[in-house]
Amino acid sequence: MSKVFPSLPNIEFLVDDNGEISIGAVASIPCAAIATDEARCLAMLVRREGERRRQLLIRLDRAIEIALEDQDPVDEINNGDDERL
């Protein structure tokens, strides 16, 4: 059974522009997704209970868009859930 993976244009844009993403354990957090450009951190998300990796990547893509539009990073690691997501 093949599932079509959604388009992730903001992740694609970021990586193509020398940014990076990482997914994995961060300190005591079992799974986080982090996006940075060359100058700053744009998003730090904590994987929610029951959230699939695909859903986490979709949220990360949206968080990158928000951070770039608002010039304000999305930081769930230090600030808890972000109402913008």
Image (cartoon, rainbow, N blue to C red):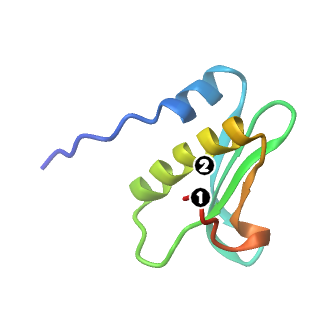
Which dot marks residue 63?
Answer: 2
Q: Nearer the viewer, mark 2 or mark 1?
A: 1
68 relative to 57, above or below: above
Proximity of marks 2 and 1: CB atoms separated by less than 8 Å = yes
Q: Amino acid at mark 1?
A: Arg
53 relative to 37, above or below: below
The residues bearing labels 2 and 1 have C-alpha atoms spaced at a distance of 8 Å
User: Residue farthest to the right?
Assistant: 39
Q: Position of residue 34 (x, y in %)?
A: 68, 51
User: Residue farthest to the left?
Assistant: 1
Q: Mark 1 or mark 2, which is nearer the start of the sequence? A: 2
Please state, as top left, top right, bottom left or bottom right, where the C terminus lies in the image. Answer: bottom right
Can residue 26 be spotted in the picture? Answer: no
Q: Secondary structure at mark 1?
A: loop
Q: Quadrant of residue 21?
A: top right
Tell me if mark 2 has few (under 14), some (14-19) or many (20+) residues whose alpha carbon lies within 10 angstroms of its own. Answer: many
Relative horizontal placement of residue 83, taking residue 37 as reference (left or right)? left
51 relative to 38, above or below: below
Name the residue at 72% across, 42% down: 70
Q: Mark 1 — residue?
A: 84
User: Residue farthest to the top?
Assistant: 17
